[in-house]
Image (cartoon, helix red, strand yellow):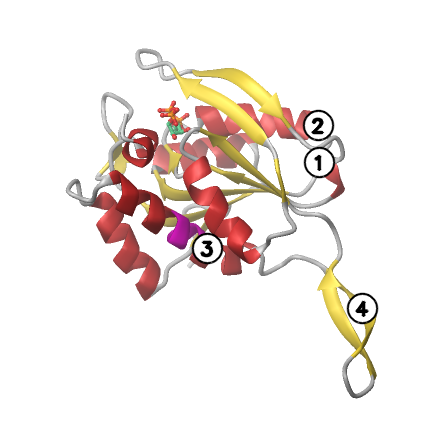
Amino acid sequence: MPSRFPNLRHVDHPLIRHKVSSLRDRTTPPHEFRRILSEVAGLMTYEVCRELETGPVEVETPLERTTAHRLLRPITIVPVLRAGLGMTQGILHLIPEARVGHIGVRRDELSGNPEGYYVKLPPDVGAGPVFLVDPMLATGGSAAHAFNLLLGAGCTDLRLVCLVAAPEGVARLGREFPSIRIYTASLDRELDSRLFIRPGLGDAGDRCFDT
Ligand code: PRP
């Protein structure tokens, strides 16, 4: 059966489900929330990297010369400030050589529209795959803002890695950026009238940083 969202990959695994249940729990304190968020990001990385290109390299093992395979192009992780920071270490743990760019976007509480306030990217960010990282995909406004910045900077291989996604945001990004794949640990039910993801987990930035 064709998926409702061809641009979406639901990264479903018992360990991820287990950890997401702790992130949803309102009694999970910030230091635990940060640790678990980072762990889930690490577990998702395996799937997010599945189609990355590798190329042959000659290496000397202790016994003989052989052909092995290495990632071909530099990877850049771009957290959306603030909450994306909570996933970055988990990905860096598995890809320590990745570069890290930053995009600051805040969502206006009344209109829900994104307001960009910071951008710092490697000058050759388009030289390899870029993982835009933000735990929450609600209306999709923040991700769309960041995608436009990254496309303008020459990125051609973009992925969004989030934790909980609302169908409304997934649909919007599918319409506006059909070739960009979204990875999420959960596709939640809906956005409510205040544009909060339901059931969701509250505001990931506030829960990470205890604000
Ligand atoms: C939250 C969240 C996403 C954005 C999602 O950030 O971390 O960045 O909202 O909403 P959208 O899909 O409707 O754009 P927020 O603006 O609360 O900033 P913060 O991370 O600094 O708390």
Residue 147's spot in the image, x, y percent? 58, 30
Q: Amino acid at mark 1?
A: Val
Question: Is 65 in front, or is 76?
Answer: 65
Q: Is residue 188 left or right of residue 99?
A: left
Residue 8 in view: no
Give the distance between the C-alpha atoms of the residues marked 4 and 3, in whole angstroms.
Answer: 26 Å
Give the distance between the C-alpha atoms of the residues marked 1 and 2, in whole angstroms.
Answer: 7 Å
Q: Which residues are magenta?
A: 38-42
Q: Earlier in the sequence, mark 4 or mark 3?
A: 3
Res 42 label = 3
Question: Is 161 in front, or is 98?
Answer: 98
Residue 185's spot in the image, x, y percent? 37, 51
Give the distance between the C-alpha atoms of the residues marked 3 and 2, in whole angstroms.
Answer: 26 Å
Image point (46%, 50%), residue name? 90
- In the rendered view, tell whether residue 135 sits above or below residue 42: above
The image quadrant that residue 18 belongs to is bottom left
Res 153 label = 2
The image quadrant that residue 125 belongs to is top right
